[in-house]
Amino acid sequence: MKGNILIIDDEAEIRRNLTVGLTQEGFSAVACPDGISAIHELRDSDEKGIKYDYLITDIFMPDIDGLKILKVIKEQYPDLPVLVITGYGDVSLELEAVSEHNTGYLDKPFEISELVEALKELTPGSTLSSGKATPAEPEIRESISAYLTIRITDTDNSLGVYKKLYYLEGVQRCEAVRGDFDIIILAQAPSQDEIDAIFEKIGGMDGIEVVSVDRVERPKLDRDVNEFINIYSNLVKEPSNMTSSKNPGTTSYVVVDIDKDAIQQIFTTVFFIDEVVFCDVIEDGAKLVGMITGQSAVGKTPRIVEKLSQIDGVLRVREAKVIKIMEE
């Protein structure tokens, strides 16, 4: 046998053709339809002492695109040979893919013989010999976090009310928005008692009405997916997108009502959308709160909101556009 290959592709016909073709060429192949199932397969094979000698992954998939999977897998298995395949690629995608160590790129359509030749060009390695990285800590946040939404009742002093909230100790984000409420606040503190004290102080202020208070919860993800997200956060998401705690220059907040039984699939899909700056879980997994980027024409629903609405298990998406009031 020439080696074990893990294939990730969302098209059933391609998975079948690759599996059959590579088997005929002397390889053993396992195919997964999406990123989450591939994450589980890699963990299961690790625990059974089964190695993979190659990974073949498509770029565009319904949950996590192949380039994001590639970043985490290369962190865990730096020497594993990876071949990125796509039918919708361009020069920038190819350059991003091959910038990773021991990674090749192949445009669809291709013959199995071309695929085998592309694999031969990669340096031999495996999931067992690569030296898996130490798993990231499972904690997403060390402190307690909670959201509070507010309507301003004293409209003549709206700027003064906003400034009081903005500079209040414990308030990490304070954004004026245009939507079902006027201000959204994210507060953080070492304990729930201190969070309650912050919100009690806010509730006692003149000129405002508190609409909702929701504690941020850890998403109910299984061990493998949670580890994958934490590694990706450390590598890419948080360093690039969370540079400013109060005003990161994003466009909108979204509140997403979801089928809580599908929380893992929905949260993972939303988390890995490029336009999503961050995504938090509230109301026992029934809602997500997030920040999104992206511009749209006046009066037109942003593309990212439409994209969120089309995810299986998403019931409703409400957008609250951020209004720029103060410069940092």
Image: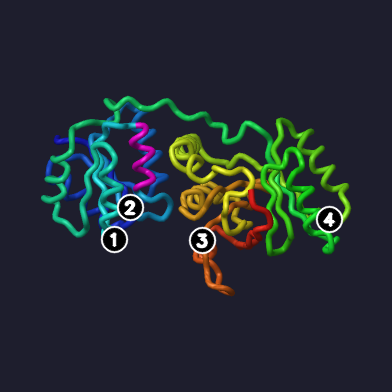
**Amino acid type, label 3:** Gly
Residue placed most toward the observer, 327 or 252: 327
Q: Nearer the viewer, mark 4 or mark 1?
A: 4
Which disc is residue 208 wearing? Answer: 4
Residue 77 spot, x, y in % from top left:
32, 32
Q: Amino acid at mark 1?
A: Tyr
How far across and how far down the image is residue 308, in percent? 52, 60
Q: From what the image shows, is residue 318 above or below residue 65?
A: below
Which region is colored magenta?
A: 67-76
For the residues labelled 3 and 1, the Cα–Cα distance comes to 22 Å
- Label 3 sits on residue: 294
Q: Which mark is residue 59?
A: 2
Left or right of 165 on screen, residue 77: left
Whichever of labels 4 and 2 marks the residue nearer the N terminus, that label is: 2
Marked residue nearer the N-terminal end (3 or 1): 1
Residue under pointer 1 = 88
Residue 284 at x, y percent in the picture? 67, 46
Nearer-N-terminus badge (4/1)? 1
Given the image, on which type of amino acid does mark 2 rest?
Ile
The answer to which image quadrant residue 180 occupies is bottom right
The quadrant of the image that shows the N terminus is top left
Mark 2 and mark 3 in contact (Cβ < 8 Å)?
A: no
Viewer-side label of 3, 1: 3
Q: Position of residue 236 (x, y in %)?
A: 44, 41
User: Could you tell me how far apart the alpha carbons at marks 4 and 1 are, in whole angstroms?
Assistant: 51 Å
